[in-house]
Image (cartoon, rainbow, N blue to C red):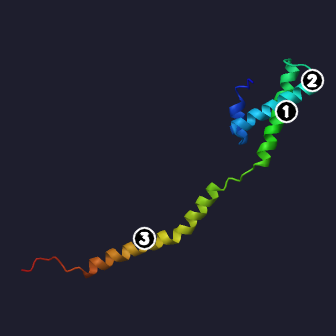
Amino acid sequence: MKTPKILPWLARKHGVSEARATKLWADALRYATDKTGWVGTSDYWKVAMDRLLELLEGEAARSCQPPLTSLVRIQTRLGLLPLIAWQGALLVASSTWSRLTAPSRRPAW
C-alpha cells in the first residue's frame, strides 16, 4: 500500500511510530471508502486525510508524555548549587591555608 509522503513527518509530529501511522492510514482509507463510496476522488482523499489527522491526534493524546527532561535538569542543577558553592569556598580556603603555612622563600642573607 502506498502511503503519503508526508506520513513520516506527521508521525514524528504527533509522536507516533511510522509503523503505527501506516496502520492508521489504512484505517483512514477504509473509513473514507465507507464514507464516500468512491475511491480516488478528491473528496475521498480529503476524508482520508482528515480521518488520519483525527486518528493521529487521538494517538498523541493517548500516549502523552510530559516533557520532564528539562525540568529534571533544572532541579538537578539547583540541587547541586550549594555543593558547587562549598567546593569553591573550600578551594579558596585550601589555597589560602597552603599559602600562609608554606615556608617563606626569601633568601637568607
Residue 15: x %, y % from top left: 71, 42
What's the CA distance linking mark 3 and mark 2?
A: 72 Å
Mark 1 vs mark 2, CA separation in Å: 12 Å
Relative horizontal placement of residue 42, taking residue 84 as reference (left or right): right
Nearest to viewer (mark 3 / mark 1): 1
The disc, 3 or 1, on the residue closer to the chain's N-terminal end is 1
Residue 32 lies left or right of residue 105; in this view the side is: right
Q: Secondary structure at mark 2?
A: helix
Three-letter amino acid code at the position of disc 1: Arg
Q: Is residue 77 above or below residue 94?
A: above
Q: Which kind of residue does numbered mark 3 sit on?
A: Gly
Q: Quadrant of the C terminus?
A: bottom left
Q: Residues within 10 Å of mark 2 (few under 14, many from 20)?
A: some
Q: Quarter of the image for the N terminus: give it.
A: top right
Q: Nearer the viewer, residue 75 or 99?
A: 75
Q: Which of the labelled discs sits on residue 51, or is there none?
A: 1
Residue 102's spot in the image, x, y percent? 23, 79
Q: Position of residue 12 (x, y in %)?
A: 68, 38
Q: Nearer the viewer, residue 11 or 29?
A: 29
Q: Which residue is mark 2?
A: 36
Residue under the image location 62 percent in, 60 percent down: 72
The kind of secondary structure element at disc 3 is helix
Q: CA distance from mark 3 to mark 1?
A: 59 Å
Taking the spot 85% from the left edge, 33% from the top edge, the residue there is 51
